[in-house]
Image: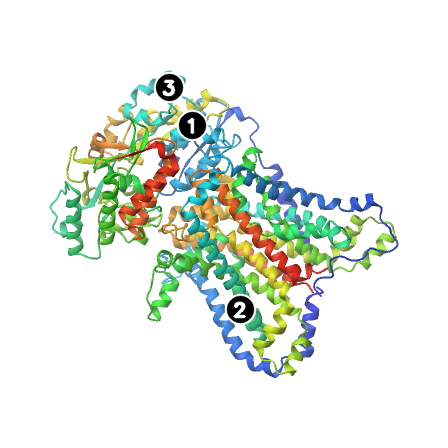
Amino acid sequence: MTTAAPASRRELYVGPSRGQRRARLPADAALLLIGACFLLPLLWLVFASLDPEAGHETRVPGEVSLDNFAAVMTPGLLFQPLWNSMVLSAGTAAVNLVAAVLAAYPLSRYRSRFNRPFLYAVLFGTCLPVTAIMVPVYGLFVQLELLDSMPATIFFMATTTLPMAIWMTKNFMDAVPVSLEEAAWVDGASGLAALRTIVLPLMRQGLGVVFIFVFIQAWGNFFVPFVLLLSEARQPAAVSIFSFFGQHGAVAYGQLAAFSILYSVPVLALYVIVARGAGSSFALTGAMKG
Amino acid sequence: MRRRALNITSLIAAAALLLCACSPAAPADQAKTLKVVYQKTDSFSALDNLFQSAKSEFEAAHEGVTVELQPIQANDDDYGTKLALALRSPSTAPDVFYEDTFKVRSDVDAGFLLKLDDHLAQWKDWEKFDDAAKAAGLGDDGGTYAVPLGTDTRAIWYNKKVLAAAGVGLPWEPRTWQDILDTARKIKANDPTVVPFNMYAGKGTGEGTVMQSFYELLYGTGDALYDADARKWVVGSDGFTESLAFLKTLYDEQLAVSPAEALDANVWKKVFGEWLPQGKMGATVEGSYAPSFWQEGGSYEWPEYGTDMGVAAFPTKDGQAPGAVSMSGGWTLAVGAGTKDPDLAFEFLGTALNQKNSLAFNIASSQIAVREDVAADAGYQAANPFVKDVSDLVSVTHYRPATADYPRISAAVQEATEAVITGSKSPEQAAADYDAAVAGIVGGDKTVRK
Amino acid sequence: MPVLPLMRPLPTWRMPAGLRRRARLLPVVPAVLLLLVFLAGPVLWAFQASFTNAALTGRNARSPGWVGLDNYQRLLTDPVLPLSLGLTVLFVGGSAILGQNLLGLTIAVLMRQARKPVAAVVGTAVVAAWVLPEIVAAFAAYAYFSRDGTLNQLLGGLGFGQPDWLYSFPMAAIMLANVWRGTAFSMLVYRAALNDVPADVTEAALMDGATGWQRLAFITLPMIRGSIATNLMLITLQTLAVFTLIWVMTAGGPANSSTTLPVLAYVEAFKFGDIGYGTAVASLLILIGAVFGAAYVRLLREGKP
């Protein structure tokens, strides 16, 4: 969107200076070294998943086999938990998107005394240690009899990522010029109508980024469903993989690795889809201006 | 392109929302559905079999009743946590559930368990249950709240081949702690790659640490954890420090597994699945249920276990009377206090624990029978070569103090063992810290210095 | 520019009445409701519960009683607390403020100098660890640091000793694992921030003969200090809450030597069933988070030009 353009234009006409060019080789080498360090822990996952006799140690499998994958690809072990993860994550992302778009619109478009305190509160809530409130949240769910309920868990998970979603959405919305709406206002359209017909279509990609960002967070969340969802039939993959690990322990590392990979692939793929548009959403500083 | 991608995501989201809106929050006809919660792991499916069989039996006998089985896949610790989380909310509390004996009293205190006295009075099978085992289901008020599935004892399990290779005479019958150390050192000298004598320690193995290790030591010194008559916790006993010192010796001389291995929650799987069958471990202290892992259909099938393994009673410290020590625990079935239909729930409990189902369960999980008609069964007695040996240990066995404070005390004991084997504290220091911890948990007036 | 100024002037032709202005805030209501019910509510509940002896089981599960400051008194005398507090500070300071932050900045700076494909490939590798589900990342880290894991294989291959990391150096292991998992966030933030630094500023510095490091320290960093403060706040609070990674790798052991506050709160509340005490620990954690958050927000406001 608007953000990628200036950056690339700058690089076009400035180009690397001589100093920069000289620094290239060491920079390349240093980066590659760092990258290798980041990939190393993942090596085990890949090797072990293909090795029918995998253990803790990383080794190139003596014989490559898909047995581990075959062993975990059963409805009870893999597909049901993955489906549960899917429902939880998509639900969380959808709730987030709706609430965040609605909240971001007045924040982005109207000046109000309410904006600044609200934004600071949201910023603060962005990273309230979720672990710390799990005990009270559990208590709350007991009192409201919401334990083991998928919708309630979705709403809670959505709330934990909502502050971040509001930030990102507001950033994207700020990038849509207000002049376009003014025309609609003249025609008598309400703010929300303008939002729906003009602003949202223009920030499609941004919304996709928010959706997937939240989706990825929810997909990987272990602790919240672990405490709030009790029956086996509703457990997402994060929890079933944990009990899988606990039970098989020393025995089935290969299957654990295969399970992990099957569980991770969907989010890795999603990330690749949005990776291009995501960069600008990390420009946190801009949001604090004003 | 982009528009389509977004449309798909929003479609999925809408579908997901719809789905959870329709997913059943609560079955419509609650009264006719019984929810049963229990533990199931890949190395423990006997209970699942028991409930599957009880379910079909019960549903056949009761038209229109559905038994909803909810196995929780977790180790003992996590199962306890998840069960406690579920019990606390009326909407998730099960009708019938699998309950560890040592949690019965605290859960009775919490009001989670239904008093079964009236139902038991009319249940003709109840008189077939062993009296000592019946005590496991008692609450503080003297009423019975849970019915035992079976019980167990703890003993030394040793690999005859490993001991014979080191020149130890068979059958091995250690009389004192010193005998154990002597034999372990002998095995170590003969083959340094073998783990001579393992005893669990640390928080990783949880209750296993105390049940299969520390209490055998403590109760063999003549001291105890709890003074049941005075209803006070014992602190400052010599036996406590001596027991820690024994563990320290085992771990310092590398007679047991390495401390790092001991702290791994899955170490017991290696003991049963690798080290003993492969002759890499001389002996360990484990429960009478050990054969359930090795017998046909077990998690670590080992056809020769009957001939390769031997069992010995754990000796008292200096061989003082009664000469041996064992610990018993076991699990029960209980009925949730909030059940909509107590009669139906109890009836299901009765079906699950009838002679046929108990027998199958006790054999499959190598439990010591608590029903006399099961104990007398020829199939039960021949289930594995060690039934008689481990059943005899009931005469010298001890039970954990069944108080609401026990789980925390147990954790403090585990912490003391962990501090000692990792070398972070001396036995004296760890014992002193334990004393302080106990006073902090139950209050100074509930402790007694011995 | 990625982000336009926050508050724009209202269109001049419409003077809003007070009521109208309030109605405009209506769309914020769902978000506010969610935040109140599921975030503010539990936080208040936590403070309230920490003054009771609520429990998962036992007598106090049925009728929790008000115990005043007992839990906090116990917390202050608990020998685990200073240890746990120290470990938490070490964990946050070492793995977030130093580790993730500096490494993320370094990678972002290097990426501007390196060849594009190299930067893209390495960026993907760094981000992969971050996108992975936390439990998978935790397993991978567990296997990596375990006694016969990849790290020790490498060290052995290079002729170094092979300690049992999770046992002998549990804090080092979980801190490195957290750096591995979380650096991507800082990297992305700094990459976006550096992209906003006008090239002519650094070009001008280049004419003056400033070396690369001086340029970074005196020109670039002050320009992105807003991003730095925001990033520091976010990663501090995120790291403060890390539970799964530690729970899977060491479960707080051995002998409590990696029991950070979230682990302590979990163990007390859910393993020992002492909800009152567990929430006292959690309340302390929230307070620490609040202090950090407030400090950064201040930093942010002062740093504003």
Disc on res. B120: 3
For disc 2, the marked residue is C122
Q: Is residue B86 above or below residue C176?
A: above
> Closest to the observer: B350 or C140?
C140
Q: Residues within 10 Å of mark 3 (few under 14, many from 20)?
A: some
Say which element carries label 1.
Answer: helix
Residue A97 located left or right of residue B134: right
Q: How crowded is mark 2: few (under 14 residues within 10 Å), some or many (20 or more)?
A: many
Looking at the rendered image, the disc whose residue lies closer to the viewer, 1 or 2, is 1
What residue is rendered at 82% in x and 59% in y?
A179
Say which element carries label 2.
Answer: helix
In the rendered structure, which amino acid carries the disc numbered 2? Val
> Closest to the observer: C242 or B68?
C242
In the rendered structure, which amino acid carries the disc numbered 1? Asp
Q: How crowded is mark 1: few (under 14 residues within 10 Å), some or many (20 or more)?
A: many
Q: Is residue C169 above or below residue B307?
A: below
- Answer yes or no: do the residues labelled 3 and 1 have beta carbons within 8 Å? no
Quadrant where the N terminus of chain B sits is bottom right
Q: How far apart are marks 3 and 1 (CA)?
A: 20 Å
Disc on res. B80: none
For disc 1, the marked residue is B109
Q: Where is residue C132 in the image (x, y as percent from the top left)?
A: 52, 56
In the rendered structure, which amino acid carries the disc numbered 3? Leu
What residue is rendered at 48% in x and 50% in y?
C243
